[in-house]
Amino acid sequence: METFEQACNLPSWGKLDMNYIDGQVVSLGDQVKLPDDLNGIVVAIIDSGEYSAEFREVDWNYLKTGILVNFPQIGLIHYEVPEDDLELVLREGG
């Protein structure tokens, strides 16, 4: 039996890229910030199976979708969709 997405010829959620509000694709290792100078690093992109060494897939893939951002000041946050105020500061290697 086909899924609703297949029947309607829609992409599955797992195939979509996660994007910042400005349209840039979220990448593993991105340095990001929230208001009030809260800086963090994207440590996992669950949809594509990308995980940093510190945050293993086996520990986090139960979330099924979204990204994990590690903020030293407040801890690890799971976003199913990046919030509008999550801003890319620096791309890893860039």
Image (spheres, grey):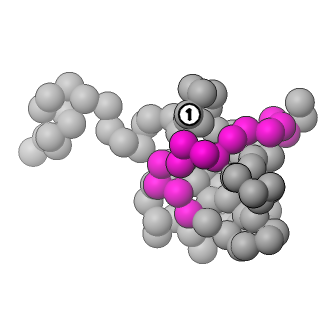
For image coordinates 12% across by 32% down, the residue present is 7
Residue at the far front: name it: 36
Residue 46 visible here = no
Q: Is residue 52 above or below residue 10?
A: below
Give the residue at x 72% y 73%. 74
Q: Indicate the quadrant where residue 27 lies.
A: top right
Q: Residues within 10 Å of mark 1 (few under 14, many from 20)?
A: some
Range covered by the magenta-colored residues? 78-92
What residue lies at 53% left-to-right and 57% top-to-bottom? 79
At which x and y percent is residue 32? 75, 47
Q: Would you say residue 23 is visible in this rendering?
A: yes
Q: In the figure, residue 73 lies in which quadrant?
A: bottom right
81 vs 23, left or right, is: left
Q: Main secondary structure of the magenta part?
A: loop
Q: Nearer the viewer, residue 62 or 66?
A: 66
Q: Residue at x 73, y 38 (%)?
A: 88
Q: Up-down: is 22 above or below 85? A: above
83 in magenta: yes
Residue type, mark 1 in image = Ile
Label 1 residue SS: loop
> Quick one: quadrant of the N terminus?
top left
In the rendered view, does 54 fall on the left or right side of 76?
A: right
Query: Looking at the picture, how far across and down is residue 26, in whole percent?
Result: 64, 38
Q: Position of residue 14 (x, y in %)?
A: 41, 44
Residue that mark 1 sits on? 21
In magenta segment, residue 81? yes
Left or right of 50, for residue 81:
left
Above or below, 85 relative to 23 = below
Q: Position of residue 21 (x, y in %)?
A: 56, 34
From this viewpoint, which residue is outermost toward the right?
93
**In the figure, is residue 27 to the left or right of 65?**
right
Q: How many numbered tags mark residues here?
A: 1
